[in-house]
Each structure stands twice: as C-alpha cells, then as structure tokens.
Image (spheres, helix red, strand yellow):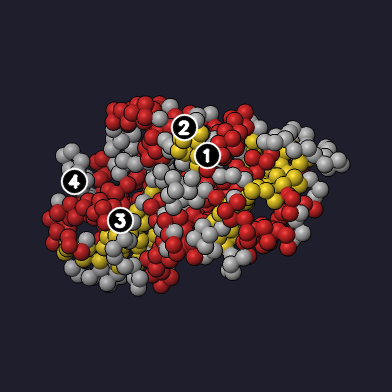
Amino acid sequence: MNEWSTACPDWERRIVAQESLIPFEPLFPDEARAALEVFGALRMVDATGSPLMCETVRAWVNEFVAAIFGAYDAEAGRRLINEFLLLISKKNGKSTIAAGIMLTALILNWRPSGEFIILAPTKEVADNAYKPIRDMIAADEELKALFQVQDHLRTVTHRELMATLKVVAADSDTVSGKKAIGVFVDELHEFGKQAKAANMLLEATGGLTSRPEGFVIYATTQSEDPPAGVFREKLLYARKVRDGVVVDKTFLPVMYEFPAAMLEAGEHRKLENAYVTNPNWGLSVDAAYIEKKHKQAVEAGEEDFRRFLAKHLNVEIGLALRSDRWAGADFWERQAIPVFSLEELIERSEVIDAGCDGGGLDDLLGFAVVGRCATTRRWLVWGHAWAHPVVLERRKEVAARLLDFAKAGHLTLVKEVGEDVAAVAALVAQLEASGKFDRIGVDPSGLGGILDAMLAADVPEEKIVGISQGWKMTGAIKTAERKLAEGVIVHGGQPMMAWCISNARIEPRGNAVIITKQASGTAKIDPLMAMLNAVSLMALNPEANSGSITQGYVEL
C-alpha cells in the first residue's frame, strides 16, 4: 500500500470543474469493491421506481463510500482513516447516504453484538435517518430474513451476530455507555448550538478506543447562524486538513463549499453557480425548485437570502442579518481588516476613547476601545467581554458560542465577582498611561462598581463619564452606522463583536431609534453597547494631547 494524504490543496479547481474531492484511491481496493457491491444493491425506496443505489447515485457518493470502507485493513483489523466529515448543501441525499453507509457497515460487520449508531440532534432528524434504513430492508427479501426491525426503538438487529444499528435522537435518548463501532453524526451544525454537545459526542464515539475497525462520520449542511461549538471546531479543523495546513492522515474532509475567490466576487449569489455545492444538481436537487426558492429569497430581502445561501448553497454565515437588525450590521463584515491587538491600536492612535456596558451575573461585561488613527484618522475598534460562569448555566442557548469566544481570547470567564471590573480598570489604566486617553463612557445605572475599580487603578475621576441610554443613544447609533458605511470605522474582525452586532435589534421611537437588551432577547449585545458609548465620546472630536501623535505606521 502506498502512502496517502487526505489533503486536497487543489480543491478549489476540482470543485468548480466537478471533479472528485477525494485526493486518493481506496487504500484497500478489495474492501472498497466489496462495500460498493453491498451498498449498490440497496434500494432507494423513496426515489421514483425504487432503483438500486448503484443505478441512481452519482460518482461522488461511490467515491465517498469507497474511501470509508476502502480504508479498512482486514489483516490488521484496523481502519486507517477513521474520521470523516461531509459538508454538503441541503437536498443532496445526505440522510439516504447515511442510511446506506450504516446499513452496509452492519452487513459487513464481523463483531458479535457490535453496535452502530446514527446520532441525530432531534427526533424529527432521527426519523428522517431511520426511515430509509427500514425501507431498504423491507424492499429486499434477503435483508428482511437477516434483520429484525423494531420501529418503536428505531433499531435494526442482525439475527445471527446480534449486532445492532440504532438511530438515536440526542434530545431524548442517552448515548452514555455506548461501545459503538461506527457512528454517523447527522446535522452536526445543530449540535454546535448545544453547550454539552462535545461531551455527548465524546460518549458516543468513545467505543472507537477499543474498536480499531471503527469510524465516525460527521455530516451536515451549513448553519443559518454563524458556526458555533463542536460544529465550528470540526469545520475549522477539517479546512486545515483539506488545505494541508494540518497533516492528519486519519481524517478525511469532503466539503462542498465555494472557493474564497468566488465568495469575494459575489459569484456564490448567482444561480448558475449553484452546482458547485450541489453535486446532486439535477438529481435529488431539483433545479426548478431551487430557482424558485432563489427568486423568493431575493424578493424577501437579505435575511431570507442569507438563509437560502446557507441551506441550499452551503455558504457560511458570518453575520446573521435579521429584518429588524441595526443598520450598521450591513457594513460590519466589509470593514474588517487583519486582526490587531489593543497594544497596536494604542500605538497607531492619536486619541482614544473607551466604553463599558453590562456586568450582571447572568450577563456579559462589555468593553470597547475606539482609537482615532494618527495617519488616516479612521476609527479603530477593539472589543472584549467578561462573563461569570453562571451565565453558561442560565443562558444555555448561547453557552457554546461564549465558550468559543473564550477559547479565541475575546472573552474571559472570571471565577470571582469583581474580577471583571478590575480587569476593565486595568485596561483603562493602560490607556491612561499611554498619554492618548480621552475618556470612558459608561451606563450611569451601572457606574458604582466600575467607578470604584477605576479610581482604585488611578484613573482620573473626571475621565469617567456617564452616557445617557435609551433614545438618547440615537446620535451614537446613527454616527456608528454612518462611519461604518463611509469606511471610517474599521475593526479586527473579532467573531465576538460580529455576533453581538448581529444580535442587535432596533426599535423606532418617534424620530429616534433604540437598541435594547429587551428587544434582543437573551442574545448578548453588551460589547456593542460599550462600543456605542465610546463612539458617543469620539463623535465629539476630542483633541489629541500634544506629543501623543504617532508617525510612520502602516495604514490600518
């Protein structure tokens, strides 16, 4: 057997040319052929005429099946590639492929009482995965004799080996204690929204440690929201392996997504390019239906169109834009530049303002810095947040995302009450020491503890300013919108700030607009409000201190 690599560095050319995204031939061709014979003899009952899989699936499906089963070294009893990720647009037959692969694995299994699992995020998704398995068995007399089917348990049992294939809904069934040989995780993006999903998947796949022939397959479409949790982790890792940045010969990513150049040029928005992320275009993906959905989404507006792009064209959502969004959100992504640190912002700025907001135990304490660049006079924005671990319990719906931000260094989980305001005070003291600091704006209702901490850090009291909230923030809101649209505000593309921007909801109040936490529900916006507090001060055009202007830096 020759050496192999799971990297596919020329994937961008391949995907546009509709070529294979698997960069190697099956490691063990005989194993691959045997699996394809079994897989191909299964019937796709829900397709017209109930054809055999070998009669209807396209080449990419057979290549994926061959890669999975062709990685098994029968002599050693070990699968050399044991982790797979399939990222593909909606309606490309993912559930049917999952059913066929897992039923094939159960048929080829030799281990008595072996366990195979399809893990779905909800009961509905579990049913979608189970029904094709049930129907494949019912359509074949030999399989009906070989397997016992228990619909109420969503379980298929091999009558001779007593090996089982079970479809498990993660929201109702337990996966602890499983010793699965093969695991198929369906709709991984949904698990990314669950704070405890990482532990759940660890339990489900734990059997692989004592099952060297085992495998785990993650299959998913893109999420309608920015990727989070275990989905984000797997997605980023898979891209690194595919691009050759990380060498992992045991992990095979097969990812139908647009090349970066097409995304930057807006080519992904053109219907004629839909085939790029839909390898079943014209088969299970009905072109007329997608054309109709595309037209409807365009007419409905950017929010609906982004949702269409995520599901049907597999485009990652960087910023979830909703109909009642803050107008500045439309320009936020465009204004991202290569990430810069707070220290770099201080160096490049002639004058600096800051803002702070939030800080409840089940809330974030948001902090933002706005510096006016000495050479371009653009406004440089940097943000950070702090949270008490209790927020992870009380706000489970956003816990996975907050943990992502903490790992990335954009959010700090504090252990003791008061650590957050002390950290803010230390940063403000750092700004003051630079000689470029103007003032910090805070919500007057939460001034007490922050004021005490900053005074203890020797921040001059006159530089701590209460910023009126509610409708009186209209000026700052409009200023930030305009500065973003004009290209004056730039930022480092921090995912945490983008998330907060996308969470913001506006409410019109006469001639004013307000952004309130109540309107934004449980989603967090504190770092955005901190930024608006800082914008309120920078909009007053503070003068730079004499001698504080830094010369000679590359433009941001």
Indicate which disc, 4 or 2, sits on the residue closer to the N terminus.
Answer: 4
Residue drawn at x 37%, y 29% is 300
Q: Measuring 20% from the left and 48% from the top, which residue is drawn there?
A: 43
Pair 2/3: label in front? 2
Residue at which label 4 appears: 45
Name the one closer to the observer, 107 or 186.
186
Q: Secondary structure at mark 1?
A: helix
Q: Residues within 10 Å of mark 3 (few under 14, many from 20)?
A: some
Q: CA distance from mark 3 to mark 4?
A: 23 Å
Residue at x 62% of width, y 55% of height: 447
**Which numbered tag is attached to residue 122?**
3
Q: Amino acid at mark 1?
A: Trp
Mark found first going from the N terminus, 3 or 4 = 4
Asked whether disc 2 touches disc 1, contact meaning CB atoms under 8 Å apart, the reply is: yes
Judging by the rendered image, the residue that carries numbered circle 1 is 471
Task: Report helix, strand or loop for mark 4.
Answer: loop
Instruction: State the image coordinates of residue 315 (x, y, percent, origin top left).
Output: 45, 39
Kindly report the distance in space between the C-alpha atoms of the residues bearing marks 2 and 3.
43 Å
The image shows residue 343 at horizontal and vertical percentages of 74, 50
SS at mark 3 in the image: loop
